[in-house]
Amino acid sequence: MGIGFIFDLDGVITDTAEFHFRAWKKLADEEGIPFTREDNEALRGVSRRESLRRMLKGREIDEATAEAWMARKNADYRALLAEMTPDDLLPGAREFLEAARAAGIKVGLASASRNAPDVINNLGIRDLFDVLGDGTSVARTKPAPDLFVWVAGGFGLPSTACVVFEDAEAGVDAALKAHMACVGIGPAERVGKAHLVCDGLHAITVEQAAALVAPAV
């Protein structure tokens, strides 16, 4: 039996948090809703719908308005994404993905973003993934485990043979619910529930990550 590595996108392979912030901030300013960088941190790793709910902070809007606002935010965000190039990969990301593939490990993406396929195309790394899971792949997004389980199914591997790489608390929770090993990227106060915590893909080896599941497979 083999091993699968499943990667979140934002904060793990590239950092689009600033683009998300600028797009949500523009919408919030236009609608008179206070929105800070700290508020934006609370949106890390969750769906667009949940992000909007958190941004509203209890303010009620009807469904048609919610759909229109999400479309506006996404249009602004996509305009920013169009500027991305391979130079926007985080340190060590390409090297880690290439090393995993060279080691015969299945490589998958599991991002709550529906824009994820466009992002990895712009980053020039589409050919490094065996399975792509995004916001359209499952009904329930993180912190539900469904997306990770879906990607593992695409590998043809059980959840226990997979390692998740996540920078969001919601993503770490989802990985643990899926009974997967997890590498948390970022501060311990955010990803400390993960089995291994590091600063980024540049700070870990494929062998260290694989060792989290190797005894089980």
Image: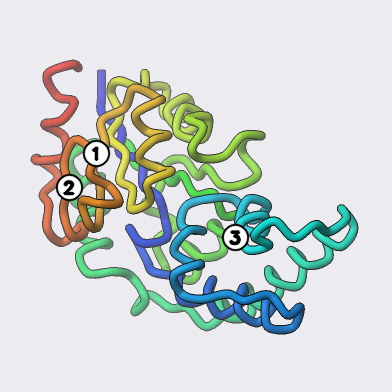
Report the Cα–Cα distance between label 3 and label 1. 26 Å
Q: Position of residue 162 (x, y in %)?
A: 30, 29
* Residue at mark 2: 197
Q: Position of residue 131 (x, y in %)?
A: 46, 40
Disc on res. 130: none
192 shown above or below 202? above
Question: Secondary structure under badge 2?
Answer: strand
81 shown above or below 163? below
Report the Cα–Cα distance between label 2 and label 3. 27 Å
Viewer-closest of 170 and 74? 170
In the image, 212: left or right of 147? left
Disc on res. 194: 1
Check disc 3: other Cα within 10 Å, few if <14, some if 14-19, many if 20+: some
Q: Please, what is the three-letter code of the amino acid marked with disc 1?
A: Ala
187 shown above or below 37? above
Q: Please, what is the three-letter code of the amino acid marked with disc 3?
A: Asn
Q: Please, what is the three-letter code of the amino acid marked with disc 2?
A: Val
Disc on res. 115: 3
Q: Position of residue 36 (x, y in %)?
A: 51, 76
Question: Secondary structure under badge 1?
Answer: loop
Contact (Cβ within 8 Å) of mark 2 with mark 1: yes
Contact (Cβ within 8 Å) of mark 2 with mark 3: no
**The quarter of the displayed image where residue 85 is located:** bottom left
